[in-house]
Image (cartoon, grey):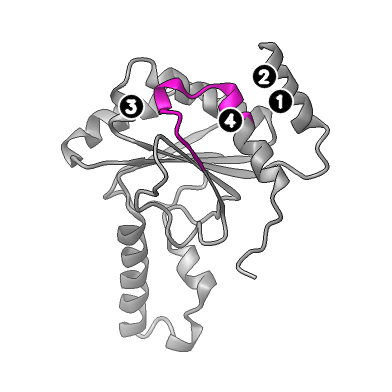
Amino acid sequence: MGIYDAYLALRHRFHDAAPPAHVAVVITERDLLEQGAYETLSDALRWAVEYGAERVTVMVSVLDEAVVPTLERELRGVDAPREVAVRAPDDTERADAPIRISIGLGGKREFAAAVQSIAEDVAAGDLSPDAVDEAEISDRLVFPAEPDLVIKTGAERLSDFAIWQSVYSELYFTDVNWRDFRKRDYLRAVLDFQNRQRRFGR
């Protein structure tokens, strides 16, 4: 670790505020085409756990669904410090592992599927309309947990991910591209989070 990285790590360690318990990282399929991209991902997962995250969600936005099988194969084999659950767009099984990776499952698509599931249960008489609340919707999402911190590399825009779950998340944008993302960049995001006063919509 370089001197500057060590300085950032010390600032984090002695900060009064807690680090994010759940970190989400938004990257693109193009990011993963860059040389060393999966090694960067493995490093980022280790940094997150090292600096206090109990859960990590990786959202991979996909423009060409033909690449999903290749991405899924590569991501299932990624070197990670904890158990990993990978979900492709048509995989509706809930992801509860400490590290979750979503490939091309847009937030609109995920939310629409949850609403459709509820509508089917209401129509079948298995669920009262009055019983439909925020918890009912969250329980039917593939990625139900709400991130504390969302990190987006390369551009200041989100990519149709976790729309429901991230409504109260703290967002951190960096112009550093994924191929150049380093520990210092991760620590900057964590320190930025620790310096904020979370309002949760208030």
Give above or below for 63 relative to 126. above
Where does the N terminus fall, quadrant-wise? Answer: top right
What's drawn in magenta, residue-wise? 173-187
Find residue 199 and report its horizontal and vertical position in percent.
Answer: 67, 63
Give SS at disc 4: helix
Where does the C terminus fall, quadrant-wise? Answer: bottom right
> What residue is disc 4 on?
186
What amino acid type should be assigned to the residue bearing mark 4?
A: Tyr
> What residue is disc 1 on?
8
Of the numbered discs 2 and 4, the one sitting upstream in the chain is 2
Give SS at disc 3: helix
Of the numbered discs 4 and 1, the one sitting upstream in the chain is 1
Label 1 and label 2: CA atoms lie apart by 5 Å
- Which tag is nearer the camera, tag 4 or tag 3? 4
Contact (CB < 8 A) between labels 2 and 4?
no
User: Does residue 175 show up magenta in the picture?
Assistant: yes
Find residue 111 and report its horizontal and vertical position in percent.
Answer: 37, 64
Give above or below for 176 relative to 39. below
Visible residue check, residue 173: yes
Q: Quadrant of residue 63?
A: top left
Q: Residue at x 77, y 30 (%)?
A: 11
Label 4 and label 1: CA atoms lie apart by 10 Å
